[in-house]
């Protein structure tokens, strides 16, 4: 009897031991798991203020994202047509010099490099002139709007309208941090947010609130703050070049053209033809919205900033670049074809679009040159009115497609349509010019200018490039050092609070 009781007690002790060991094991496992989780929990080291412009400071809290962002310094990738290398586009295609005669882009137009170079490239551009002081120079301060996170900081300090006032050089010492974290992120939640008022205002005019958009939509809208068509409204606020998106009638080239025609807006008067011209900025978002990827819910970031995994953590790759430089991480996430096949698909579309776009360029050059000749032969304004409007519309369609940054891939069908209407409109302008020549007593062919190089084209339209380079050199020697000095002093004065 005693033996049975001891066996029962032993079994109870054994069972209790098993239970205790089980729960101790569970506790140990839980502790280990919590420690592992704790290693991945975000622990900020620096307090980020509402409009903190210094990307390096954000990088202390988000090192992986920051390190990938810093890779936008890499300019080695060059695709068949673009990439992130510095490319002199006027040297590649001198016809553009003539198309932009009388406008800053005829002086200098380079393929944009990575976001890291936003401040450097705009400062070095001949388009921004060679100002002697902060009140000199051809460009308004509004031209800084998309160049970095100092812009929303400054808008918050002095006001939106005040930011849009004055000359480009007047705020040069303030805009020193290139495109980065504060342009797209809320410092408290890290949620995507819109920091540029023009986009918010454009949607408000459509009865939409940007706060109502989904996270996936925001992954395109933060790009749309800058990669859009815009113009400077000089009537909204006295003395200001108020940045405005012309979307009130829609996103298409036709809708925007109609909007500009209705308000009688033009960016400049052409130096040869005297046509009231429109300069497309970079309507990447508008063109993207007409393509298959937007239709399928694919955002800009899905292709240009795909997710990556590092050290067991998944995060967005902030090396904003062409998907062709990361086909495995972008295209092949959805498409199972070989990388060489996918790249060929892109180039095939680009080749076909650019073939027709080049034809439109040639027709536009001829139209501008022939219009110039018509004026010299005594044409009257009333005789030229419809012709100049056709030239305006045809070149708008060319520029809308050429400036859209990847448009021939984003929406090849729509881009092809826009170019085809541009070709027919340019031809219509030339037919009208031929009839006018006959009316003026001339029937001879107007020779096509020798614009086989950028230098020849610039000389043809009357640019003094030696003077322009001298002015830019003077700016770099005089005003630029003061900008750097002022910026350094302000950076040192800004507080850094640590947790």
Image (cartoon, grey):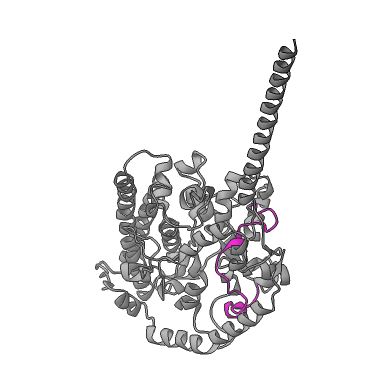
Q: Seen in the image, is 300 located left or right of residue 29? A: left
Part of the protein shown in magenta: 165-191
Q: Residue 497 location in percent, x, y?
A: 72, 68
Is residue 278 visible from the viewing direction of this image?
no
Q: Looking at the picture, tell me which residue is in the foreground, 309 or 205.
A: 309
Which one is nearer the viewer's eye here, 124 or 136?
Answer: 124
**What kind of secondary structure does the magenta stretch mostly adopt?**
loop
Q: Front-most of 446 and 93?
A: 93
Residue 9: x, y in percent? 73, 19
User: What residue is drawn where x is 52% and y is 58%?
Assistant: 227
Eyeballing the image, is 230 above or below 170? Answer: above
Q: Name the residue rendered at 46%, 69% in the picture.
A: 381
* Residue 475 image offset from top left, x and y in percent: 50, 86
In the figure, 347 relative to 118: above or below?
Answer: above
Q: Quadrant of the C terminus?
A: bottom right
**On screen, residue 13 above or below 109:** above
Residue drawn at (31%, 62%) of the image? 362
Say which residue appears at 54% left-offset and 86% top-offset.
Answer: 481
Inspect the magenta stretch and tell me whether residue 189 lies in it: yes
* 163 horizontally vs 400: left or right: right
State yes or no: residue 443 in magenta. Answer: no
For the image shown, how many numbered marks are present on the structure? Answer: 0
> Which image quadrant for residue 451?
bottom left
Q: Residue 414 location, x and y as percent? A: 42, 46
In front here: 180 or 375? 180
Q: Quadrant of residue 272?
A: bottom left
The N terminus - image quarter: top right
């Amino acid at each position: 009897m005693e033996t049975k009781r001891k066996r029962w007690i032993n079994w109870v002790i054994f069972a209790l031991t098993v239970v205790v060991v089980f729960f101790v094991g569970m506790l140990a496992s839980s502790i280990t798991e919590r420690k592992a989780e704790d290693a991945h929990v975000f622990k900020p080291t620096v307090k980020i203020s509402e409009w903190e412009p210094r990307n390096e400071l954000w990088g202390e809290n988000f090192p992986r994202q920051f390190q990938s962002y810093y890779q936008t310094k890499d300019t080695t990738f060059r695709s068949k047509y673009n990439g992130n290398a510095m490319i002199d586009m006027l040297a590649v295609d001198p016809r553009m010099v003539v198309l932009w005669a009388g406008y800053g882009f005829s002086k200098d137009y380079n393929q944009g490099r990575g976001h890291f170079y936003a401040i450097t490239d705009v400062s070095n551009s001949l388009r921004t002139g060679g100002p002697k002081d902060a009140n000199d120079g051809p460009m308004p301060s509004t031209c800084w709007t998309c160049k970095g996170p100092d812009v929303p900081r400054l808008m918050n300090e002095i006001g939106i309208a005040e930011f849009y006032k004055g000359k480009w050089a007047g705020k040069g010492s303030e805009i020193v941090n290139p495109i980065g974290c504060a342009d797209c992120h809320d410092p408290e939640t890290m949620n995507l947010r819109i920091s540029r008022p023009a986009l918010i205002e454009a949607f408000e005019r459509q009865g939409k609130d940007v706060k109502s958009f989904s996270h996936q939509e925001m992954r395109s809208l933060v790009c749309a703050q800058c990669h859009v068509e815009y113009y400077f409204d000089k009537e909204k606020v006295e003395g200001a070049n108020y940045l405005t998106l012309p979307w009130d009638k829609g996103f298409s080239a036709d809708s925007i053209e109609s909007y500009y025609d209705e308000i009688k807006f033009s960016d400049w008067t052409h130096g040869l033809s005297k046509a009231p011209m429109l300069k497309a900025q970079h309507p990447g978002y508008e063109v993207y919205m007409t393509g298959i990827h937007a239709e399928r819910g694919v955002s800009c970031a899905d292709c240009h900033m795909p997710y990556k995994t590092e050290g067991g953590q998944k995060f967005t790759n902030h090396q904003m670049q062409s998907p062709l430089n990361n086909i495995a991480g972008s295209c092949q996430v959805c498409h199972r074809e070989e990388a060489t096949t996918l790249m060929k698909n892109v180039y095939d579309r680009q080749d076909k679009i650019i073939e027709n776009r080049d034809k439109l360029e040639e027709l536009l050059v001829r139209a501008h040159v022939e219009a110039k000749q018509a004026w010299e032969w005594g044409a009257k304004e009333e005789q030229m009115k419809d012709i100049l409007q056709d030239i305006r519309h045809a070149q708008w369609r060319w520029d809308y497609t050429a400036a859209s940054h990847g448009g021939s891939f984003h929406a090849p069908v729509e881009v092809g349509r826009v170019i085809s209407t541009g070709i027919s409109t340019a031809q219509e302008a030339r037919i009208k010019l031929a009839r006018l020549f006959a009316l003026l007593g001339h029937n001879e062919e107007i020779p096509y200018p020798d614009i086989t190089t950028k230098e020849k084209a610039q000389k043809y339209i009357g640019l003094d490039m030696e003077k322009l380079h001298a002015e830019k050199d003077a700016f770099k020697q005089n005003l630029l050092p003061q900008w750097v000095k002022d910026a350094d002093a302000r950076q040192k004065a800004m507080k850094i609070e640590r947790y």
